[in-house]
Image (tube, grey):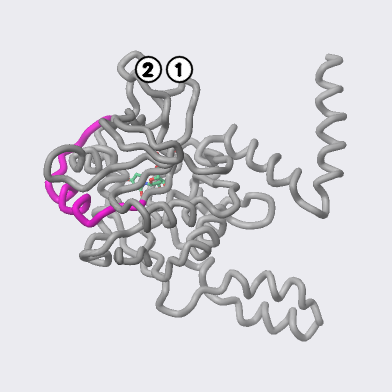
Amino acid sequence: MRQRVTKAIFPVAGMGTRFLPATKSIPKEIMTLVDRPLVQYAIDEARAAGIKEFIFVTSRGKGALEDYFDHAHQLEYELRTRGKFDLLKILESTNMESGAIAYVRQHKALGLGHAIWCARRLIADEPFAVMLPDDVIAADPPCLRQMIEAYEDIGGNIIASMEVPRERASAYGILEVSEDFGSYFSVDSMVEKPNPSEVQSNLAIIGRYILTPSVLANLDRMQTGAGGEIQLTDAISQEIGAGGSKVYGFRFTGQSFDCGSKIGFLKATVAFGLSDPHFGADLREYLQETVARHHDH
Ligand code: UTP
């Protein structure tokens, strides 16, 4: 029996510079996609995958994110006395068990690898998940659940992956395939934000990982990599080869949105809006009219 994955790290200590000026005062991770903050989508996905401990790596200025997870007793009371039970149910569904969330601080934004390393003492010696809340994934079953099911079968380190246009490779970490098994493949090498001419593959890393604790040991010894940051990709890459644990890419079923970028956030807003049962049809009509009007200009 493999050890169960019950802990997830949510690195949220980045500066979110692509969303300035909004991120001057609002953490990117609580910006609203339709009606809930980005981080709620990640939490819901983690819960559906059986995660019990939620570890946030935060930084200065992320107080609003921590507050979001407090229970809103007064608001719940008001909704109950006014008989607004639908809203009450929505609110209660976001409540987290006391003690399920832990916050560790990353004192300086030294990169994703460094952020994960900051949580090392809370992980100790077990496999764990990493979820980047700005990658929102529409999938059924949810992406992390698909990955944990695969992990129960194959073990090792598992990285969510999808094909991207080759010329966009430099915006991602890229996985080179060693052996292909269909829904997953073993990884031959991986590189963060390569020049497209440097890589054979167009399989990009998406922000969901299941990792072995040996990756944390690699981070103990890490130097800065691409962009002057301590890269998680480099620490995982050290596992490939003799003596390391296996590294797999996983082709999840579903659609991923890069909500860390403006265009990705807008696309996610449209896609999630269109599938809303209450106003999806209205939005579709509005979009059709708007696009037609833009055509005429
Ligand atoms: P990004 O590359 O999206 O960086 O980080 P960012 O700072 O959030 O955003 P931009 O590029 O300035 O607009 C990917 C994930 O890693 C976390 C971020 O919070 C995000 O979830 N991260 C990144 C950290 O926690 N610490 C870091 O030092 C860097």
Residue 260 image position (x, y, % from top left): 50, 40
Residue found at x 67% / y 43% = 269
Q: Quadrant of residue 172?
A: top left
Q: Identify the residue position indicated by label 2 in the image.
A: 196
Residue found at x 38% / y 60% = 8
Is 102 in front, or is 137? 137
Q: Identify the residue position indicated by label 1 in the image.
A: 167
Is 99 in front, or is 166? 166
Ligand 1 within 8 Å of disc 1? The answer is no
The answer to whether the residues at label 2 and label 1 have Cβ atoms under 8 Å apart is yes
Residue 34 image position (x, y, % from top left): 68, 51
Give amino acid for label 2: Pro
User: Which mark is drawn over residue 281?
Assistant: none
Magenta stretch?
210-226
- Asked if the magenta segment contains residue 221, the reply would be yes
Is 37 in front, or is 218? 218
Quick check: 249 above or below 103?
above
Residue found at x 23% / y 38% = 237
Residue found at x 61% / y 81% = 73
